[in-house]
Amino acid sequence: METDRPRLLVVGLDAGCLHVLKPIFEAGQAPTLRRLFEVGTHGPLESQLPPWTASAWPSMYTGQNPGKHGVYDFLSFEGYDWDVVNASHVRARPVWELLSDHGFSSVVVNVPVTHPTRSFDGALIPGMTAPESPPCHPEGILEEVEDAIGDYRVYPQSGPEPNQSIESYERTIEGRGKAFRYLVDRFEPDFGFVQFQQTDSVFHERPGDKQAIEAVYRAVDDQLARTILEFDPDNVLVVSDHGIGPVEGWEFRVNEFLRERGDVVAKSGGEGMPTWSRAWENDLLEGESAGEHDTSLLEQGMNLAARVGITTQRVANALDTVGLKEPIGRRVPNDVIRAASEQVDFPNSRAYLRSKSELGVRINLEGREPNGIVPEAEYESYRVDLIDDLSSVRTPDGEPMFEAVEPREAVFDGPELELAPDIITVPADFDNAIVEGLEGEQFGDPIEPWNHKRTGVVAAAGADFDESASLSGATIFDVAPTICSFFDVGIDQEMDGSVLPIVDASERTSYPSYEPKPITATEDGAVEDRLADLGYL
């Protein structure tokens, strides 16, 4: 039946969870969201491993685990080189492309890891990991949107308001809602998907700031209310990629543990890796790329100091004794800090944590890595020993650091399994955290007082939903099969999830192999900086 409104509206709340939403509802800060939860059905939505934005949203919109879609982190690795992930790294079919193949149109706004765009029936403005002012689908649509609503921003700090200010969050969220409504009016889609990233970033940038958190949710609720009032969508599905909460345990420096074990070799003076800690002010506005960075005189000086043992870590310890570590640290550019730090020498190490948000240890395997030093014949025994040792780690309180330490094939499956870390480490209740830095001690206080949790949230309200159905046991992989079933489209047999009981399940169907575009480099220093600002890199 022809309609000028979405039959299904999906609202993505990054890091949304009942732990956060309940006090916001009780304070009357999000009445529209609260009404959807009360009139429909809701429950916890279990995320995946790792429960981080860049990997979790592709899992949601493809219905497949990272072993199939290929994105495990904000970064992708090839040997010792890296890049920020983008949509070309996603090797599985997004649900809106599947709907398009069956005659249903979509409008998708701000969903992470959707740049560069692909052709389908509808419109798409990419979200996180896209550059500011990204190319959109169809070509030229962002310019049309901005002519209609004013400037549109992917990231809050690209506007005139102070960085990390409530005003910058509110303006970004307002633009998100206006752009979505313009496109819904313009394309009259069957399916609409709008995602709000600030419900996550506010916790990373202003942890525990009740005023800022409530302001973000008020702004999101206002945009949702305006959208419902204007288009009256038949059904609304609220989803999140993971939860968030305080980290009250310990920070475990995995590479320090591996260094003591004899696996990690360190370098000083900015020569080691990782090299993704660059943060250059205003790159997000100017669009500079990673290759355009010149070493400053201060970096060069700190580099030389590090080579004779005057490292950032030693200076920080001295400052800490007089209470100046944090205020001075906030004023030193990341590249200068890195130039005077110890880093992991990946080519000469046997195993290492490359990125904290992929939750895994990689083995420098001979024949696989450019300078692999662990013989293939020793891989399994070496990995078993490393899993046993990591599993035995106890925090200074005597509690297990990890709730699970597993080989990658116990967590993921699919043709992209080889891209995964060799060992997956799951912090206990996600109340502990892991980091990749070399800080001298293996344990310390968490640098981020709030961080991701495994359990998000899902809510469904609408005439075509069974609002009496229980959503207990729902997972992030269930969302795409449920969307397919809502439109009576065959569920791709490669999808890992089940259909939520709010709709009748469609049949499983074998589709032609997905043919993604060739992988392209992101090469945008501004995107890297934004991820660093949020603590992901």
Image (spheres, rainbow, N blue to C red):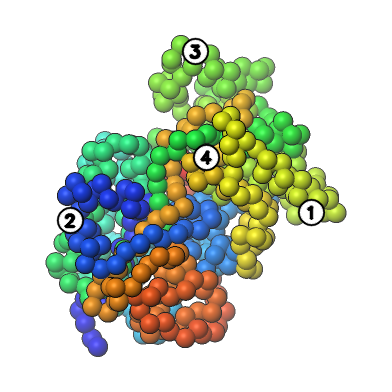
Residue 126, compared with residue 453, is above or below; it is below
Residue matched to label 1? 380
Spatial separation of the CA atoms under disc 2 and disc 3: 47 Å
Q: Earlier in the sequence, mark 2 or mark 3?
A: 2
Crowding around mark 2 (Cα neighbors within 10 Å: few <14, some 14 to 19, many 20+) is some
Q: Position of residue 166 (x, y in %)?
A: 24, 40
Spatial separation of the CA atoms under disc 1 and disc 4: 26 Å
> Which residue is at the far top?
322
Spatial separation of the CA atoms under disc 4 and disc 3: 24 Å
Q: Nearer the viewer, residue 474 or 363?
A: 474
Horizontal relation, residue 69 to residue 162: left or right? right
* Mark 1 and mark 2 residues within 8 Å of each other at the beta carbon: no
Q: Earlier in the sequence, mark 1 or mark 2?
A: 2
Spatial separation of the CA atoms under disc 3 and disc 1: 44 Å
Local SS, label 4: strand
Residue at 58% x, 47% y: name it: 403
Q: Which mark is residue 317?
A: none
Res. 464 visible in picture: yes
Q: Earlier in the sequence, mark 4 or mark 2?
A: 2
Label 1 is placed on what type of residue? Answer: Glu
Q: Which mark is residue 433?
A: 4
Label 3 is placed on what type of residue? Answer: Thr
Residue matched to label 3? 321
Horizontal relation, residue 301 to residue 156: left or right? right
> Which residue is at the far bottom?
1
Spatial separation of the CA atoms under disc 1 and disc 2: 54 Å
Q: Earlier in the sequence, mark 3 or mark 1?
A: 3
Residue 348, compared with residue 67, is above or below; it is above
Q: Please identify, in this view, whether the residue under mark 2 or under mark 3 is nearer the observer.
A: 2
Residue at 21% x, 73% y: name it: 233
